[in-house]
Every structure is written in structure tokens, then in C-alpha cells.
Amino acid sequence: MKNDLKDRTKNFSLQIINLIKLLPKNLAASIIAKQLIRSATLVGANYRAVYRARSDKEFIAKMNIVLKEADESYFWLELIFEKNWLNKDIIIPILKESNELTAIFVSTLKTINARINK
């Protein structure tokens, strides 16, 4: 599962990079694009760091960063969706993936916190 999520988070970053190219060329879209590409690529980059954690405490701290960036990415994608800047066939699958990744990170954090608090 670890490598699957590494690949999945990297693929999410690549999807966002491709999506950014399709956004309209205006100030608002440009600002949101910069925020989205930052948060989305940090999901994958920080996820890789999670598995170099030296303790459960460090793992949880790093995973919380991944969760924060995934949730932020979802927010920017929601704005793009609600502004109708992209065809729904393009944005909906990426929104779905962002939501699924966020759910996986929440579940992972719940699991490790439950294990630690036993």
C-alpha cells in the first residue's frame, strides 16, 4: 500500500500540473493555480517524508502536514469547479481523487492514534 500511495500522490501532482495548463488566463485563476499547484505537489513530496519518520510522533506530525495539503488542494479544486473554469469531465475525477486521498490520510491518522492511545 505504501508504494501505491507514493505513486498515487505523485500521479495526483502530475494531474494537477496538467489541469493548471487548462485554466483561463486571468488574475483570479492564476492566483488559485499557484496555490493549487503548491498544495497538490506538497501532498506527494510530504507523503514521501512520512515513511522516513523516526517515531510515531514524527509520523503523525508529517502525516498531518500531508492531510492539510490534501484538504487545501480539495478547496482550490472546489473553487475551480464552482467557477466553471473547466469542463466537468476534467475536474470531477480530480476532485474525487483529492477527496479519496484526504479520506485515506484521515483514516491513517485515526488508526495510528488509536494504536498509540491503547
Image (cartoon, helix red, strand yellow):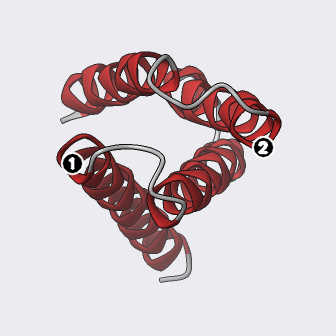
Circles 1 and 2: CB atoms closer than 8 Å: no
Q: In the rendered view, would you say 112 is above or below 38?
A: below
Q: Residue at x 78, y 43 (%)?
A: 28
Mark 1 Cα within 10 Å, few/some/many (few <14, many 20+)? few
Q: Which residue is drawn at 64% across and 46% down?
A: 69
Whole-percent x, y for residue 78 in the image: 51, 62
Whole-percent x, y for residue 105 in the image: 43, 57
31 with respect to 24 (left or right): right
113 with respect to 10 (left or right): right
Judged from the image, the secondary structure of the residue bearing numbered disc 1 is: helix
The disc at residue 29 is: none
The disc at residue 28 is: 2
Front residue (pair 23, 62): 23
Looking at the image, the residue that sits furthest to the bottom is 118
Mark 2 Cα within 10 Å, few/some/many (few <14, many 20+)? few
Q: Hey, what amino acid is under mark 2?
A: Ala
Q: Hey, what amino acid is under mark 1?
A: Pro
Total labels: the figure holds: 2
Judged from the image, the secondary structure of the residue bearing numbered disc 2 is: helix
**Where's the N terminus, which quadrant?**
top left
Whole-percent x, y for residue 59 in the image: 60, 44
Whole-percent x, y for residue 61 in the image: 72, 50
Q: In the rendered view, would you say 23 is above or below 58?
A: above
Q: Which of marks 1 and 2 is in front?
A: 2
Identify the image quadrant of residue 4.
Answer: top left
Give the distance between the C-alpha atoms of the residues marked 1 and 2, in whole angstroms: 23 Å
Q: Residue at x 82, y 35 (%)?
A: 27
Q: Which of marks 1 and 2 is nearer the N terminus?
A: 2
The disc at residue 93 is: 1
Front residue (pair 55, 81): 81
